[in-house]
Image (cartoon, grey):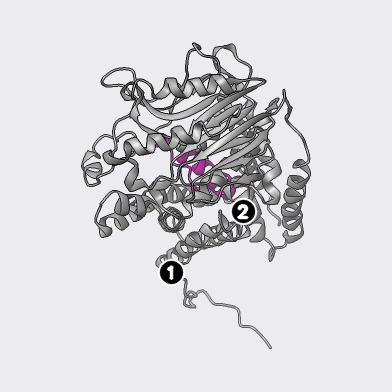
Amino acid sequence: MRFRRAKPDDPPKPQRSTRGRMLITGLAGALCVLAFAPFGWWPLEILGLATLFYQVLRSTSVKAAALIGWAFVTGWTAAGVHWLYVSMHTYGGMPAPLAALAVLLLGAAMGLYGAGAMGTAWWLRKRWTLPLPAANLLVFPAVWALFEWVRGWLFTGFPWLSSGYAHNHSPLAGFAPIIGMYGLGWLAAVIAGALLLLLHRTRLRAAGLAIGICVAGVGLSFLQWTYPEGKPISVRLLQGNIPQDEKFNGAKIVSNMKLYQEAITAAPADLIATPETAIITLQQQLPPDYLPSIAQFLNKTNSNLILGIFTADSQTAYFNSVIGIPAKLGSSYYRYDKHHLVPYGEFIPYGFRWFVNLMSIPLGDMTSGHDIQPAFPIKDQRVLPNICYEDLFGEEIAAQLNHPAQDQKPATLLLNTSNLAWFGDTIAIPQHLQISQMRTLETGRPMLRATNTGATAIINGAGKVVQQLPVNTFGTLAANVQGMGGSTPFIIWGNKLFLALTTLSLAGAWFWAKRSKNQPKAA
């Protein structure tokens, strides 16, 4: 069979429209929700990124590439955080169509980061006239990861479902103590780029790179960056399971306070911890004998308590806090104030009060605590709390471990207190547990989780859930936990190593392009 060479006047081969490519990548992005907890099908995320890169590489302009990237991240976000509908409609009273529209608008807003990433990657490839291997392995993964990093801090940040979180149990997990969650997302994107080269003449090198990254990750998982410090402490983590529609009900406040008082005093432990805002009244508004009676129990049993409660320093300075009541009577209370607040939930961005007014959720403009706060000392251990949403920000936790407050030694245990009852029985609960697992991988510290409805759990320093209460049940999780000392590279450097590697990747692509231009053409 002979093939006819195309003539200059032959009509061009039909190209898939940008809308068609957007539909494909939008669906691929939505399917990536299956890569995260509770499903854990992490290879789907790599295949999704490979689909994105393929469609962008075959697009014809910066605008088309940006639209394709926007569709991918919009689908990714809307499918992944659909549970926000529950908080806005079921508990916030927002009409169902508006709540659904709000979730889609959030996805569309996050999609702008995907648009920026893919538009930039396409432009760099054309600007530098890069061959396919340089684009797939150096430019696209680095730009994707850098825009994810920007999404994690711009406008206070929203890193939920960043791609690295899908890999807390994948072969890439061993890299987490070195380059953190964003670094894992970058490596996943490199592997996705390598998959696109399996039909290219460089397929053997690309396959070798992908396999080498996975093998290195498995090998790194055997390294011990931290070490046991002091003796283990006994802990009791309380899960009140108070329905969200009853939590702020005035008629239920007294009974809820009694529930936690009875749960706290049911048995001793070196550390007893309640969920976030277990007590919804201000500390100053509690009955005069409430905390003193608990303190008497703590003193008698040599126990220590971390209690979730609202606090106030003035009529205008309100905090989402935990207070620590030590075993020794007369000792001053410890206090940690949440410093990374949730937009719309704990502070209202300028110009969006109208949106908050559509919901009947007890929201308010809270005051942010200090970035660096001391840990709560308990025997040989030092417990560093973070409240709910704060454990999404790994570099902030690492900074508190690297530069502890008040000349303390670094904390040996992490504690997350949360209330995810706002989101019902949805995948928000296992997703948040997965986020906490990533923090333990990055820091080598165990994480204790005390939550209202779940997931109340104990995670060891290797990111494994060793104990967990069933969700949506009342209960207490009791265990002995060993604190860990020492530092991982991520504690010391935060995201700096990840940023250096992605910058070097882009620099390598630029040098590749420059060298190609300077090479003499064959006669």
* Residue behind mark 2: 136
Q: Is residue 17 above or below residue 279?
A: below
Callout 2 amino acid? Asn
Going from the N terminus, do you reach mark 1 or mark 2 first?
Answer: 1
Quarter location, residue 97 = bottom left
Q: Name the foreground residue: 319 vs 246.
A: 246
Q: Is residue 283 above or below residue 148?
A: above
Q: In this view, does 433 lie to the left or right of 504?
A: left
Q: What stretch is highlighted in magenta?
A: 138-163
Q: Does the magenta stretch include residue 156?
A: yes
Q: Where is residue 387 in the image (x, y as percent from the top left)?
A: 47, 33
Q: Is residue 517 visible?
A: no
Q: Is residue 512 above or below residue 407?
A: below
Q: Where is residue 403 in the image (x, y as percent from the top left)?
A: 58, 19
Mark 2 packing: few (<14 Cα in 10 Å), some, or many (20+)? many
Asked if one can make out residue 220 in the rendered structure from this viewpoint, the answer is: yes
For image coordinates 27% across by 38% down, the residue present is 250
Task: Report the quarter where the N terminus lies.
Answer: bottom right
Callout count: 2
Q: How far apart are marks 1 and 2 (CA)?
A: 22 Å
Q: Which mark, residue 487? A: none
Q: In this view, does 270 lie to the left or right of 198?
A: left
Does 405 appear above or below 196? above
* Neighbourhood count class around disc 1 (C-alpha, 10 Å): few under 14, some 14–19, many 20 upward: few
Quarter occupied by the C terminus: bottom right
| Amino acid, disc 1 | Gly
Label disc, if present, on residue 20 of the rendered structure:
1
Instruction: Give yes or no for residue 486 being in the magenta stretch.
Output: no
Q: Work out whether residue 157 or residue 308 is closer to the camera in this orientation and state it.
A: 308
Q: Residue at x 28, y 48 (%)?
A: 92
